[in-house]
Image (cartoon, rainbow, N blue to C red):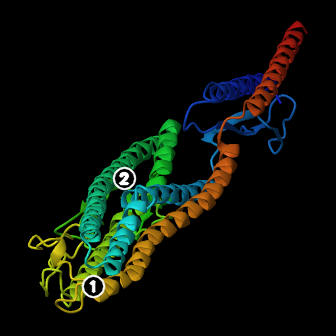
Amino acid sequence: MSLSSLFNTARQSLLTFQAATSVTGQNIANAETPGYTRRRLALGTTPVSRGGVLFHDPRRGVGGGVTGTALERVRSEVLDRAVRTGRSGSEGANASARLLSTLEGQLAPDGGDALLGAVAGFYDAWSAVADAPADRGPRDALLAAAGTLTSAFNAADGRLGAFAEAAQTELGTTVDRVNGLMAEIAELNGALRSSDRDGVPDLNAQDRRDAVLDELSGLLPIQARPEADGTVSVRFGGLTGVQGTESLPLRLVGPPDASPPEVRAEGVSRPLDLSSTEGGVLGAQLGLVRDALPAAQQALDTLAADIVAGVNGLHQTGTGLDGSTGLDLFEPTGTTAGSIRLSPTFPGPDALAASGAAGQTGDGSVAAQLAGLGEDAYAAMTDVLAGVGSQTRGALAAADANAAYAEYTSALRDGLTKVSLDEEMTDLIRYQQAYAASARVLETADSLFDTLLAI
């Protein structure tokens, strides 16, 4: 090796470890920067120097020292995939639990006491009339209980309707956010493709794209695949959402085109199908507006229709104190929770048909039969509330399970990608010592050169 090669080796080492120290300083400075991925200067040997003063055999040579071969991010595609899977499950289950809990509260804000109490109170009032069919007091109480029952159904229906509108609006906001994130990924793909083509990868843009992919994975389950040109393709639900610099927008389709609402990709007729607990926030919202809300509404409407049909059917067979018969207590066309109401033409308390025959004022046989309908109606109302409650508990359990997985995978990835000040300080000392050693080599070469000149 010639003295010139020795000088070059020492100089190259100084520059390399200066760069490595700079990278370490950048990591330390960005230890708390959100989305920052730890950088690393990959080290390698410089091309071998052949010949020279000491070795004249061209087949022999001495290494040219150390150099930085690449500035790279410390990242794992396997861990990224695991974290994003965990985020889809965790965010989806949490959103599902939140939405179902809200639905439960809208259906029964008092824990169900109003609806259950109204149903029980209505049929108990019939029992009181059966015990004293000629008394006016129980009859007045029965009409009041009937009004309470219809009001409770109407109020629950109103709350469900308002919640459905709010849920659909929230779903639309999520769709817009998904579209915005996919458009940003496509834009970053273009920038990164250009930087890779120029041979200078944009690590900050890569950090931003990974952060966007993480956020997108919380909204819906995605599969992100790196491409050879530096871009990332994004797929979900059997669709390609991002390919190169192009993204596929989603749109919310509601009534009258779709009821319940659906999410479709532009140019695709079939709806996007996502799990309500593992399909991210979008899947949870779709599950609510597509399944849980319509099911709760249908169950409430069915119960209202059964009450109207059952009560009116028996009431028409009885006779009131005023001799009237064949009357409907409820409006026959009001067969939903929102439309159930007392018949506007019902004469009043004396027309309540408690007796099985005219002139038998002490007969409460029909009223007793009507009271007997209460057990089934109460059980049906309990089933409506219990069904939503069961879904809520299931979503809460799924949220706990998915949260544990998400936290575990995130901790694994953070241990690799995030800056550890202890590790960086160790590297800083190591690079400083290597820099000092290279400087010592340079001093030695200089001393040898002076000695050679003095000969």
In the picture, residue 454 is in which quadrant? top right
Instruction: Kindly tell me whether residue 294 is visible in this rendering.
Output: yes
Residue projecting furthest to the top: 454
Task: Name the mark on residue 178.
Answer: 2
Q: Above or below — where is 202 with respect to 265?
A: above
Residue 300 rendering spot, x and y as whole percentages: 32, 72
Amino acid type, residue under disc 2 in the picture: Val
Task: Name the mark on residue 343.
Answer: none
The residue drawn where x is 35% and y is 49% is: 177
User: Is 320 situated left or right of 424 in this image?
Assistant: left
Residue assigned mark 1: 362
* Label 1 neighbour load within 10 Å: few <14, some 14-19, many 20+: some
* Label 2 neighbour load within 10 Å: few <14, some 14-19, many 20+: many
Residue 399 rendering spot, x and y as whole percentages: 57, 59
In the picture, residue 198 is in which quadrant? top left
Residue projecting furthest to the left: 345
